[in-house]
Image (tube, rainbow, N blue to C red):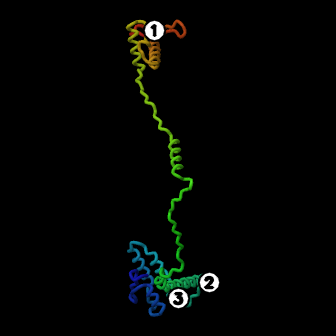
Amino acid sequence: MDEQGYKVKLEQFEGPLDLLLSLVEKRKLFINEISLASVADDYIAYVQNLSHFPIADSANFILVASTLVLIKSRSLLPTLTLSPEEQGSIENLENRLKLYKRMRALDSHIRERYGKIILFLPKEAPTREPVFSPHAQITVPTLLLSIRSILKNLPEKETLPAVIIASVISLEEMIERLSKRIQSTASISFREFSAAEKKNKVHVIVTFLAMLELVKQGIIAVTQEKEFGDIQMESYDVGVPRYN
């Protein structure tokens, strides 16, 4: 834990936790006079006031505090008989603490030498300049021939013919026109009325449908003397429809 981090503040000692451990191990401070519970509570309050949780410092605190707890437990209970499992746990903790202490001692040496003496350098990839090396058969005439072949195989632009959509007379309008024509002439043939319209096939079809609708309503009567012959249309009284 660095000098800017957590510091222990007790009646007997004030300073970094590592220094407290060092003084206890050197028997310059008595562990029995130190309240480790107060140290733990004080550290928890210190961590809660930080904006970010210090993972490295907390791990260091746990290791140092574990060592102090082990020392104090042995001091308070020197004749305590431990089970094999408890003894193994204590020995495992002692080995971990010794290893950690050794790593902390080597830390300063590693910081001084890290990156200064490089044993293995990364292999540098060979530098290759990009070179345009076309095939011997690629010449100006062959390139021109290839371009002409590509242009020849391009799909031709297709232009759709302009279509003019003519207006078609509605069935209601044709019924009204045919009804007025028959009323004015009393009798007229279908062919004569269609020729008078001078329209296309669509108008002839609409005329035929209009004729059928007037027959259905009983407004006109139609006769056809032979198959595929002309149809004669005659008027009934428009005000009084008749149905056959």
Q: Mark 3 — residue?
A: 74
Q: Position of residue 176 (x, y in %)?
A: 39, 15
> Which of label 1 and label 3 is nearer to you?
1
Q: Quadrant of residue 94?
A: bottom right
Marks 3 and 2 sit apart, C-alpha to C-alpha, by: 16 Å
Q: Within 10 Å of the Cα at label 3, are there few (<14), some (14-19), or many (20+) other Cα atoms?
A: few
User: The disc labelled 3 sits on which kind of residue?
Assistant: Arg
Q: Mark 1 — residue?
A: 189
Q: Position of residue 181 (x, y in %)?
A: 39, 10
Question: Residue at image x 41%, y 6%?
Answer: 186
Label 1: state its secondary structure.
Answer: strand
Please state which of residues 183 and 20 is positioned toward the viewer in this rendering. Answer: 183
Q: Within 10 Å of the Cα at label 2, are there few (<14), some (14-19), or many (20+) other Cα atoms?
A: few
> Which of label 1 and label 2 is nearer to you?
1
Q: Which mark is residue 84?
A: 2
Do callouts 3 and 2 mark residues in contact (Cβ within 8 Å)?
A: no
> Is 181 displayed left or right of 156 in the figure?
left
Q: Position of residue 107 (x, y in %)?
A: 48, 83
